[in-house]
């Protein structure tokens, strides 16, 4: 991804969409950027983050997996003073990006 990022930044174009990793991959493989390349790259990147969040939650509460009490869940997913830092907000952001680029023939 670092190599793709470097290549994208050095592309000769005034169009910002031409200077991203997804466009570079689409051009390299000769596929449609929005329907054939972006969904897989977005799922890989943001799906990995969602999985990481789930693993962090699991590791942080292994001894209380059956605890579905309101306060425990609030502490787990919405700890801290900044709503933007809430785990639920971070998960929602990643999921929204994945939803934006649906995989063809998924499921």
Image (cartoon, rainbow, N blue to C red):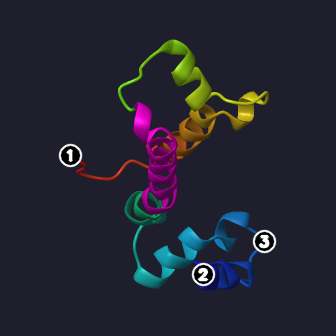
Q: Mark 2 or mark 1, which has the lower sequence index?
A: 2
Using the image, tell me which numbered label, if any, was put on residue 107: 1
Element at label 3: loop
In the image, residue 8 lies at what x, y percent?
67, 79
Task: Name the residue rendered at 55%, 35% in the picture.
Answer: 92
- Magenta highlight on residue 46: yes
Q: Mark 3 packing: few (<14 Cα in 10 Å), some, or many (20+)?
A: few
Q: Determine which residue is flagged by label 3.
A: 14
Element at label 1: loop
User: Which span is picked out in magenta?
Assistant: 42-64
47 or 32: which is nearer to us? Answer: 47
Q: Mark 2 packing: few (<14 Cα in 10 Å), some, or many (20+)?
A: some
Tell me the CA gap for discs 1 and 3. 38 Å
Tell me the CA gap for discs 2 and 1. 29 Å
Q: Mark 2 or mark 3, which has the lower sequence index?
A: 2
Mark nearest the camera among 2 and 3 is 2
Task: Name the residue rendered at 73%, 67% in the picture.
Answer: 15
Q: Determine which residue is flagged by label 2.
A: 4
In the image, residue 2 lies at what x, y percent?
63, 81
């Amino acid at each position: 991804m670092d190599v793709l990022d470097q290549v994208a930044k050095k592309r000769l174009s005034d169009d910002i969409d031409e200077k991203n990793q997804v466009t570079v991959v689409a051009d390299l493989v000769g596929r449609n950027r929005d329907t054939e390349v972006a969904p897989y790259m977005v799922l890989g990147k943001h799906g990995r983050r969602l999985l990481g969040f789930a693993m962090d939650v699991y590791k942080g509460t292994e001894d209380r997996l059956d605890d579905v009490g309101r306060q425990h869940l609030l502490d787990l997913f919405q700890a801290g003073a900044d709503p933007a830092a809430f785990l639920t907000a971070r998960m929602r952001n990643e999921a929204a990006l994945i939803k934006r680029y649906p995989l063809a023939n998924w499921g």
